[in-house]
Image (cartoon, helix red, strand yellow):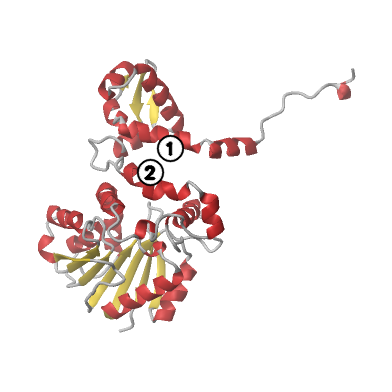
Amino acid sequence: MTAKEEGPGPVAQPPFLDMFFQAVNAFHRTESLKAAIQLDLFTAIGGGAEAEVIARRCNASPRGIRILCNFLVTMGFLEKLKTDGYKLTPDSKTFLDKSSPLYMGGTVEVFLSPANVDGFKDLASVVRKGTTMLEKGGVLAPEHPVWATFARAMTPIVRMPAESLASMLGGDTRASWKVLDVAAGSGLYGIAVAKRYPNSRVVAVDWQNVLPIARENARFDGVADRYSVVPGDAFGVELGNDYDVVLITNFLHHFGPDSIEVFLSRIFRALKPGGRAVFLEVISNEDRVSPPNSVEFSLVMLASTEAGNAYTFSDYQRILERVGYSKVEIFPLPPTPFRVVFAQKKA
């Protein structure tokens, strides 16, 4: 047999197959991280520990711990020691060890809750219908319990972006502002403004079951005397008026363009002349396929809301200008994936 007649050599696996199997088996990664958090594995490892010790601390089998930890090593959450042990990566120590003030393991309870997961169980039907298959309103149903859980779980990791956003407002720290914080959640965005501007007063709007968390954080941060709450639906409750600043954080993406315009018209009326609407969002680039997190976020909105989306800046700009806002600007909020939009009511 000549060289040309020789049989084929080993066939390299096309990158497509890697991509395909990673997508099909992505739930392995999800459930492994979820299991580790449920076992409190990251806290058990602490500064590093042998598999047998970790197993005792987690009340689990050594075999199970070894296999799970080895997989978490490949995922980048752990490092393997030369002995039969494991240690946390710097990021895992910061965000997944319960002794850290930035612990974010509690968010898994929200992100993997039925309110979020169930919308993806029949995504084909969601795509055919063009909206969520969840019960009326999805996660936006009045007093949905997911938001109280979300507010408490997100409290440790919202502090940094909240403080960054407060610093972007500029102006004299002696400014005497009246601030409205819509869908306040943990309350930390409004609280950060109250702390940076000691003469400001904040009014927080959210569901009745969420506001106790915001008030608790206001007391903790020493601004409770300048922090008041208004329970109810942000689209229907009386907001008041003469606000210098209205904060709208991670809220608008839940709704369709018409509802967003109605809401921003309400905010426009609540602002004093020269006042600013400031909103923080996951915002897609104009190509609508970047950055990747915004594209995935659009899919989440499709599965869990009736009309939500990750909009582009031009989408928001058109709505804001129709309502009557001027000086519409967008800014990044590094190192977060969020962007901040400023829109002013003419003086």
Residue 48 percent location from the top left of the image: 30, 24
- On residue 151, the disc is none
Quarter where residue 247 is shown? bottom left
Q: Residue at position x 21%, y 76% from top?
A: 240
**Residue 285 sits above or below residue 84 on the image:** below
Residue 295 percent location from the top left of the image: 50, 54
Residue 339 percent location from the top left of the image: 40, 60
Q: Is residue 212 left or right of residue 41?
A: left
Q: Distance between the residues labelled 1 and 2?
A: 9 Å
**Residue 86 sits above or below residue 151 on the image:** above
- On residue 30, the disc is 1
Quarter where residue 235 is shown? bottom left
**Residue 49 sits above or below residue 296 on the image:** above
Residue 332 percent location from the top left of the image: 40, 60
Cβ–Cβ under 8 Å for marks 1 and 2: yes
Seen from the viewer's position, the closer of residues 279 and 252 is 252
Identify which amino acid the numbered label 2 is placed on. Leu
Mark 1 Cα within 10 Å, few/some/many (few <14, many 20+)?
few
Q: Residue at position x 35%, y 66% from top?
A: 279
Identify which amino acid the numbered label 1 is placed on. Thr
**Residue 32 sits above or below residue 162 on the image:** above
Q: In this rendering, does residue 154 appear at all?
A: yes
Where is the N terminus found, in terms of image quarters? top right
Q: In this view, does 221 lie to the left or right of 186?
A: left
Give the labeled residue for mark 2. 112
> Sequence-wise, which precedes: disc 1 or disc 2?
1
Comparing labels 1 and 2, the label whose residue is closer to the camera: 2
Q: Is mark 2 on a helix, strand or loop?
A: loop
